[in-house]
Amino acid sequence: MSDRKQSLLVIEEIVGKNPKTVDKETKREFWKLVRQIKRSPDPDPDEVVIATRVRNLLFSELRGREFPLGPCVGVLFLPGLLMTYWYLRLLSVPLELATILVWTSSDWWLFLRRLGCVMGATFFFYPFGRLIAGKWSGIKIEAMCKGMYSEPALKIDYESFLLAEPPKRKWFFFIGGAWTVITCLILGIPGWFIAGDVSGILAGLFLGLSEWLAIISGTTKKVGGEMAHYNREKKIENSWKKKLAQIQSASD
C-alpha cells in the first residue's frame, strides 16, 4: 500500500468519526494529498475513491443539505425565465441613454429595475454554466446545494472530477464562470438593439472585468469565485505537464 493511500485512510477514519471536529491540520494534509492526486498523470483509482469519500463528508458538513438535481434545475429555470420576461417588458418603457444627464428619479428607477432583472436572471441561470461545462468535460454533477454565498450551486461528482485531466478541470471552471458574463450579454445585446438599454451590457462588462482581474491576479482564494478554481487548476496543469514530459523523456 502506498504512503499516500495509507494517509488517506487515516484521514478518512478521523473525518468519519465527526466531520465537525476535524482540525485544520488534518484538512490541510488532506487537500495536499488531493493536489498530489490531481497532478498525477495516472491517478490511483483506490486513492481517488477514498479521497472522494472524505471530500463528501467534509462537503456535507460545510454546505449542508443537498437536493435532487433534476427537479431543482427545473425550479431555477422558471424564475430565470420570469426575470427575463420582466426585463423584456421593461424595455417597452422608453428610456433614452442620450438624456442620461437629465434622467429623473423614475428614469433611474427604471434603469435599476432592468439591471436587477438581468442580475436576477444571471443568478438563477448560473448553475447551467456548470451543467454545460460538465457535459463538455465529462465531469458529472451530483446534486444541487448551497454555494459559498448561499447562492444555488451544483455539487460535483468528485470521483469523475479527480479522474478528469487537468485541462478539462481548468476549463470546467472557466466555462462556469464565463457563463455569468454570457447570460448578461444574451439579454444585454438584444436589449441594446431593441431599446438602447445598457444595463445588461454593463452587468456583463462588470462581471467580465471582475473575472479577468481574478485571472491575472492568479488568486486561488474563494473571493475569486470560479476563476480562483481556474487559477488553481491551471497551476496543477503545469505540474501535470512537467510530469508527463518527464515520463515521456524517460520512455524515449
Image (cartoon, rainbow, N blue to C red):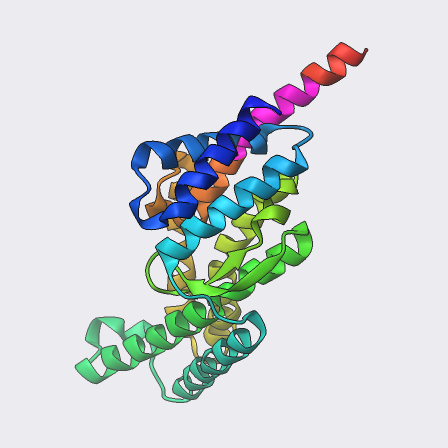
The picture places residue 154, in percent across and down from the top left corner, at: 50, 61
Q: Is residue 174 above or below residue 67?
A: above
Residue 138 versus residue 95 in the image, above or below: above
Q: Position of residue 143 (x, y in %)?
A: 53, 64
Relative to the observer, which residue lies in front, 195 or 209? 209
* Residue 243 lies in the magenta-colored region: yes
Closer-to-camera residue (198/223): 223
Location of residue 29 with respect to 189 vertically, above or below: above
Q: Residue at x 46, y 43 (%)?
A: 229
Q: Position of residue 44 (x, y in %)?
A: 66, 33
Point 61% across, 26% down: residue: 240
The quadrant of the picture occupied by the C terminus is top right
Q: Position of residue 194 (x, y in %)?
A: 49, 80
**Total numbered labels:** 0
In magenta, the rendered stretch is 234-245
Q: Nearer the viewer, residue 47 or 105?
A: 47
111 inside magenta stretch: no
Q: Is residue 238 left or right of residue 148?
A: right
Residue at image coords 45%, 45%: 227
Q: Is residue 88 visible?
A: yes
Rendered image quadrant of residue 244 = top right
Q: Residue furthest right?
A: 252
Foreground of the two, 231 or 185: 231
